[in-house]
Image (tube, helix red, strand yellow):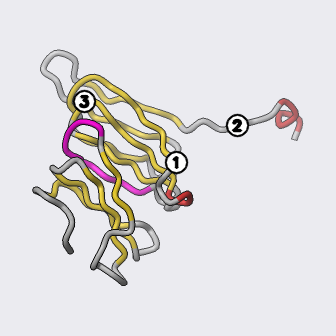
């Protein structure tokens, strides 16, 4: 596999077993198909620093990419990783994890003053009449 320009920090397999993601010091996350490792399927660029953590949701719909500081990207795998939500934080990150049911995203923030574990819950869109079902 060729493409990254520096040290590799993270990797994760898609639940289908064909795609895997790599996070690198060069500020990119590359997606690879094991059936053709000559070129990456997609290259996701970070905003500021190295990609230190990557995780696929258990249903394979989302890829979470965390930079070493300030940014977490949640990409939609069904839309070729082009549509994504960006979480902008302040400070270094220890890593990210998803709950087994994919309902919650956890972000570890190591800091000697305000170390914390941030929790983000998935938002569901329910309509007015859903309460009557």
Q: Look at the numbered discs 2 and 3 and tell me whether their residues touch, using CB distance below 8 Å.
A: no
SS for dot 3: strand
Which residue is disc 3 drawn over? 109
How far apart, in angstroms, are the residues tagged by discs 1 and 2?
18 Å
Please indicate whether residue 110 sits to the left or right of residue 90 in the image.
Answer: left
- The majority secondary structure of the magenta stretch comes to strand
Which residue is disc 2 drawn over? 125
Q: Quadrant of the N terminus?
A: bottom left
How far apart, in angstroms, are the residues tagged by discs 2 and 3?
29 Å
Percent from the top left, x then y, of residue 68?
Answer: 21, 39
Dot 2 crowding, Cα within 10 Å, few <14, some 14–19, many 20+: few
Q: Nearer the viewer, residue 70 or 129?
A: 70
Which residue is disc 1 drawn over? 83
Disc on the earlier residue, 2 or 3: 3
Disc on the earlier residue, 3 or 1: 1
Percent from the top left, x then y, of residue 119?
Answer: 42, 31
Percent from the top left, x then y, of residue 8?
Answer: 15, 58
Q: Which residues are magenta?
A: 47-56
SS for dot 1: loop
- Compared to 61, does 36 lie above or below? below
Dot 1 crowding, Cα within 10 Å, few <14, some 14–19, many 20+: few
Disc on the earlier residue, 1 or 2: 1
Which residue sits at x=15%, y=50%?
25
SS for dot 2: loop
Label at residue 122: none
Which residue sits at x=22%, y=47%?
27
Which residue sits at x=43%, y=36%?
86
Does the stretch in magenta take in 37? no
Residue at the limit of the structure toward the top, as seen here: 113
Q: Look at the numbered discs 1 and 2 and tell me whether their residues touch, using CB distance below 8 Å.
A: no
Q: Nearer the viewer, residue 130 or 1?
A: 1
Q: Look at the numbered discs 3 and 1 and tell me whether their residues touch, using CB distance below 8 Å.
A: no
């Amino acid at each position: 596999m060729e493409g990254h320009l520096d040290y590799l920090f993270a990797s994760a397999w898609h639940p289908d077993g064909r795609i895997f993601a790599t996070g690198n010091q060069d500020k990119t996350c590359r997606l690879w198909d094991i059936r053709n490792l000559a070129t990456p399927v997609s290259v996701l660029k970070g905003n500021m620093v190295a990609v230190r953590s990557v995780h696929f949701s258990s249903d394979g719909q989302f890829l979470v990419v965390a930079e070493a500081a300030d940014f977490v990207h949640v990409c939609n795998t069904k839309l070729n990783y082009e549509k994504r939500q960006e979480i902008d934080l302040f400070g270094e990150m220890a890593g990210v994890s998803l709950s087994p049911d994919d309902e919650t995203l956890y972000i570890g923030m190591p800091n000697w003053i305000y170390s914390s574990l941030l929790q983000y819950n998935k938002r569901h869109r329910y309509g007015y009449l859903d309460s009557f079902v």
